[in-house]
Amino acid sequence: MNDLGVGGRARLRRAHEHRVDQQPALVLHSYPWRETSLIVEAFTRDHGRLALVARGAKRPTSQFRGLLTPFSPLLLSWSGRHEIKSLVRVEWCGGLPPLRGSALFAGFYLNELLVRLLARDDPHERLFARYVETLGALARPEREPEAALRAFELDLLRETGHAPAFDQCADGAVVDAGATYRLDPQRGLVRVEGLPGDDDALLLPGRSALAIARGDFAAPEAAADCKRVLRYLIRYHLNGQPLNTRRILNDLHRL
């Protein structure tokens, strides 16, 4: 006979709940849940992307009010054993300047990529560091944002297993700077023999492939090729579904 009683069983259940305290994190996205709460998608340093329920976050007196905004460095504490954990405490720790104008749209683009391409509860400590570094670069108006965005896209695709080895062909041969390659999103780079068609969007000069492998986007040709190829890979692994941030930015440019 179970003699724990209701209170004893509740205490035992709580004792087995997983508790994490003061984990460095940034909010990627949040949406309403019930009348006064929020579901928060957060990217954490040691636990990857998480879904957290912030109970009562929309109440005027909530401890969470004004803190659960994107691009604010936070220390999050949560508990729970299920896919959606319970947010317990939020502390603002600062250290990043605010994003403004086009940099703000770029930041939301990064957040949407993380929500759409990262599985939950899959740690990516190196990618978290790159994300924080990229937000810092976007906040500095004197810095060129394109190189920072390409580096982040490349790291994200590598971390999720979606990027080929740009210095090596699908058959194991080393990429030749003077050759031309076609990108197969499943296999990698395939050397093109003969004269390729100029309209093939997946063609990549060997010198650009090697520059991408090094993370060197200084040359205009390599930067343009990198942007085209990485955007294709992102679109492919999103099954062709458009990114909302890119659509909104395109609409604004047409105004």
Image (cartoon, rainbow, N blue to C red):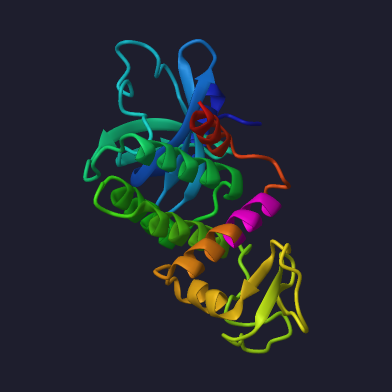
Q: Which percent across, then down, holds residue 104?
A: 37, 37
| Residue 210 visible in the shown view | yes
Using the image as rendered, state which of residue 66 and residue 47 is in the foreground. 66
Q: Which percent across, then down, holds residue 198?
A: 71, 67
Residue drawn at x 42%, y 31% as measured from the top left: 87
Please identify the quadrant where the N terminus is shown.
top right
Q: Which percent across, then down, holds residue 186?
A: 74, 66
Residue drawn at x 28%, y 45% as measured from the top left: 139
Residue drawn at x 29%, y 50% as measured from the top left: 136
Q: Is residue 104 above or below residue 147?
A: above
Q: Which percent across, then down, holds residue 238?
A: 68, 47
**Magenta portion: prevailing SS class:** helix
Residue drawn at x 45%, y 39% as measured from the top left: 42
Q: Quadrant of residue 174?
A: bottom right
Using the image as rendered, state which of residue 105 and residue 152 is in the foreground. 105
Q: Specify whether residue 210 is painted magenta.
A: no
The magenta segment is 229-237
| Residue 18 visible in the shown view | no
